[in-house]
Image (cartoon, helix red, strand yellow):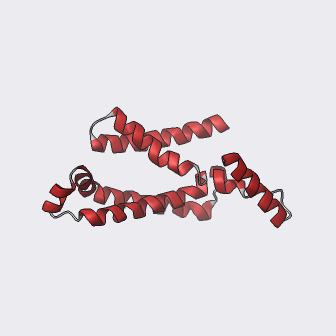
């Protein structure tokens, strides 16, 4: 299906413009080397996303483990879900510019799944997940060069 998507995207962009049709493929796979200085605002947005996630980490952990206890302690458990999905969506949207629309799922889900298997401590898993995502990104860049 990925190959068909690439084929039809190339076919569409080739017939819609006079270029070779490779611009549409960057939507799927991104271009981390193609980011310029004006797109450096991604760093500021990433810092804001990290701060938002760190602010809600403890209540979110409590609501995830036991929603009834979280509600009894005054944690707005039902509001935490959408409040957490907003930074995750912003992270995926901002990452799409650099790594395309396919890789953010792998950079968000795979390191977290691996980290939770390697440790039982939630905050250690959070840090390990970030470290694994960065390591995977740099390893991918090194292998592609």
Residue 125 seen by the camera: yes
Q: Say above or below: 38 vs 30.
A: below
| Left or right side of 93 for 22 | right
Query: How many tags in the picture?
Result: 0
In which quadrant of the rendered view does residue 88 lie? bottom left
Q: Say above or below: 76 vs 142.
A: below
| Left or right side of 43 for 78 | left
**Residue 82 spot, x, y in % from top left:** 36, 65
**Residue 36 spot, x, y in % from top left:** 64, 59
From the viewer's side, name the closer residue of 74 and 52.
74
| Left or right side of 12 for 35 | left
Q: Give me the residue at 24% from left, 54% from top.
A: 58
Residue 73 seen by the camera: no
Quadrant that contains the C terminus: top right
| Left or right side of 108 for 142 | right
From the viewer's side, name the closer residue of 140 and 67.
67
């Amino acid at each position: 299906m990925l190959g068909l998507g690439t084929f039809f995207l190339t076919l569409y962009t080739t017939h819609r413009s006079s270029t070779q049709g490779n611009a549409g493929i960057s939507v799927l796979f991104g271009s981390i080397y193609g980011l310029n200085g004006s797109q450096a605002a991604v760093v500021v947005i990433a810092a804001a996303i990290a701060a938002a996630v760190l602010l809600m980490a403890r209540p979110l952990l409590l609501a995830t483990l036991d929603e009834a206890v979280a509600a009894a302690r005054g944690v707005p458990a039902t509001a935490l879900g959408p409040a957490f999905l907003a930074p995750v969506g912003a992270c995926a949207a901002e990452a799409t510019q650099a790594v395309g629309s396919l890789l953010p799922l792998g950079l968000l889900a795979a390191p977290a799944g691996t980290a939770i298997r390697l440790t039982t401590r939630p905050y250690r898993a959070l840090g390990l997940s970030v470290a694994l995502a960065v390591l995977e990104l740099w390893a991918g860049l090194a292998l592609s060069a």
